[in-house]
Image (cartoon, rainbow, N blue to C red):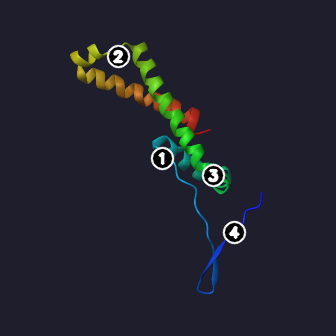
Amino acid sequence: MSTQLTYHREGDYMIPNLIAPEAESIGIWGRRRREYLEKHRNGVYTGMLLSGKLNAHLAEIDRQAEEMFECLTRQMAAEQGITEQLKAENQMAWVEAMNNIRNAAEEVILNELIYF
């Protein structure tokens, strides 16, 4: 497959007419993955960026991480007996328990999806 590049003149220079691919919406998990790739896996980051696969990869990681986060928090809350009844009876205990669960789920996601 051959692609014809077109150019336009700016002063004495011929500049290629390049169109960037549509950027997908990337959430916090995708942004964390991009930051990790930029800092610690620069070759992978650059290769994906140049091939046009980076945004799709980041969007997929973001989607997977969001699903995993919801599933893990639900499972951990059920295992630890964190219920709506506890929320109604003792809000501070419920908030403390849910914050601990969210932090644990975040650590799992970081190790499983973001920092690999």
In this figure, which residue is indicated by the disc labeled 3? 45
In this figure, which residue is indicated by the disc labeled 2? 82
Look at discs 3 and 1 and give the one toward the viewer.
1
Task: Inspect the image, locate mark 3, and give the three-letter code of the amino acid beneath it.
Answer: Tyr
Whole-number angstrom distance, CA of label 1 to CA of label 2: 33 Å
Which of marks 2 and 4 precedes in the sequence?
A: 4
Q: Residues within 10 Å of mark 1 (few under 14, many from 20)?
A: few
User: Is 72 drawn above or below residue 116 in the view shown?
Assistant: above
Based on the displayed image, in which of its 4 quarters is residue 19 positioned? bottom right
Task: Inspect the image, locate mark 1, and give the three-letter code of the amino acid beneath it.
Answer: Ser
In the foreground, 27 or 102: 27
Which of marks 2 and 1 precedes in the sequence?
A: 1
Look at discs 1 and 2 and give the one toward the viewer.
1
Please report the residue visible at 48 percent of the width from the left and 33 percent of the height from the top.
66
Q: Position of residue 111 (x, y in %)?
A: 56, 34
Whole-number angstrom distance, CA of label 3 to CA of label 2: 40 Å
Please report the residue visible at 51 percent of the width from the left and 34 percent of the height from the top.
65
Please report the residue visible at 63 percent of the width from the left and 51 percent of the height from the top.
45
Q: Position of residue 109 (x, y in %)?
A: 52, 32
